[in-house]
Amino acid sequence: MLALSGLYSCKEDFLDVDPQGEPKAENFFVTPEHAVQSVNAIYGNLREWKVAAFANLAMTNIASDNADKGSDPGDATFMNDFDNFTFTSTQFILADYWAGQYQGINLTNQALSNIPKIEMDQNLQNRLLAEAKFVRAYHYFNLVRAYGDVPLLLNPPTTGEELNPVRAPKEEVYQQIIKDLTEASQVLPASYDAMNIGRATKGAALTLLAKVQLYQKNWTEVMNLTGQVMSLGYGLTPKYNDIFRISGENNMESIFEVQALTVPGNCGASNLQWSEVQGVRGQFGWGFAVPSEDLVNAYEPGDERLDATILFRGETTPEGDKINENAPNPRYNQKAYVPSFVSRDCGYGKDQNMRILRYAEVLLMRAEAANELNQNAEALKNLNLVRVRAGLGPIESATQQALREIIWHERRVELALEGDRFYDLVRQGRAAEVLKAAGKQFTAGKNELYAIPQTQIDLSGGRLTQNPGY
């Protein structure tokens, strides 16, 4: 019922994960190499279509006021359901997102249940388990934000009841996320050697935990956690545009990225289509999830992030690509842009990492928490670090309410098209107001959560219940 699947077989390279030829459980989880391979498969799942592509973009960016469907009007018209909030529980994109997240959870649960049985180096074993806990928490955070109460599976299901669970209260899901991330942060290293860059770090676990606490409005915890992250040596990349180029992957600002790498002759190993789906239609990719005019108008004059976030039809990029003047859409996501000189042996943009957590968000989370705790000077200090990097002047003073709205606005333009805007609006209690103003058919009391996929309700024999209004 929850898109349960076996372990992917993996090659030795961390990035080289082949989803074909799943080994039988009785032949796996025997050697230390199996333990490493099982965790590599967990990372590999983060590149899967249902996790990284259409469903992800529809339910985060296109549903927000930051992006429109894009592409040609007649292509993938079902994506309009998320632009307009006209989807129903039978919309397959909802089922795809659900299945992709639970496939990742199943992989983490298999690793967490079986790696402890393997005789191996204790430090490596503990680290692998911590990595699995981090990714499991990430998947559950995606699920609980999207659907609210969701089934909470912590072991590979064996009984009929475990294979057909009911929804756990979202409070219980959040408690498990916090537990996983707390335990992971106590074990994970601050950094890795060059062969293991991209694995979850202590900073990644602490940052995601701070974000979870932000959603819970646990402001003191957010202050504590962001303070810990700030002591780990991260910093802002001097030029905003550099963050999102291939040359800027895993740089000083990066805290966690989904890793991608072209492997000629084995293209399935790195099949991350996040960039391809959003690339300029007819030139680089498919042209979906294009920046909205409302987002363009949100930037202040002189904000360097505008040109680094949005590719305009007819412009020439800093890397020398002339964007087609006759492209179907007036704007595209520049954060997903991969210059034409990069190899296309496996298709466009397959080398482009997907950024999940970065240091600028740590500063903005700290600013928001400090403001809620009436620590005005601390809030302004962290907010202004982000603004000045963008070429803007600092905010000298503001009331708590005014500063709250400034910080919310700063999150919008700093993290634009990175998947947080819709959920930010929901947690801020402004989703109906803002999205209706943007022309969307958003229904308050309903669309703050997505529909539980009807296919899952049917498969459960009605044990799964539906969210209100669907």
Image (cartoon, rainbow, N blue to C red):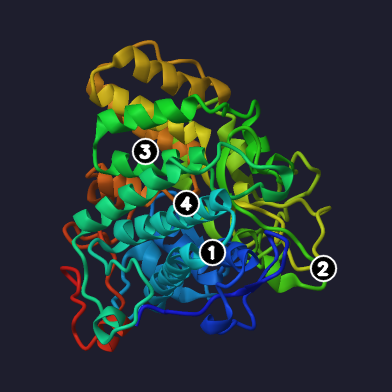
Q: Residue at the spot x=59%, y=30% of the render?
A: 304
Q: Secondary structure at mark 4?
A: helix
Relative horizontal placement of residue 168, taking residue 123 as reference (left or right): left
Q: Position of residue 417 (x, y in %)?
A: 50, 49
Q: Secondary structure at mark 1?
A: helix
Question: Is residue 86 visible in this depiction of the protein?
Answer: yes
Location of the N terminus (image quadrant): bottom left
Question: Is residue 407 visible in this depiction of the protein?
Answer: no
Closer mark to the observer between disc 4 and disc 2: 4
Q: Secondary structure at mark 2?
A: loop
Q: Mark 1 = which residue?
A: 42
Q: Mark 4 = which residue?
A: 130
Nearest the viewer among 36 and 169 is: 36
Q: Position of residue 252 (x, y in %)?
A: 63, 32
Answer yes or no: do the residues labelled 3 and 4 have beta carbons within 8 Å?
A: no
Label of residue 264 in the image: 2
- Name the amino acid, label 1: Ile
Closer mark to the observer between disc 3 and disc 4: 4
Answer yes or no: do the residues labelled 2 and 3 have beta carbons within 8 Å?
A: no
- Name the amino acid, label 2: Pro
Label of residue 210 in the image: 3
Question: Which of the marked residues, 4 or 2, is nearer the chain's N terminus?
Answer: 4
- Name the amino acid, label 3: Ala
Q: Residue at the spot x=69%, y=40% of the render?
A: 248
Q: Is residue 140 above or below residue 372?
A: below
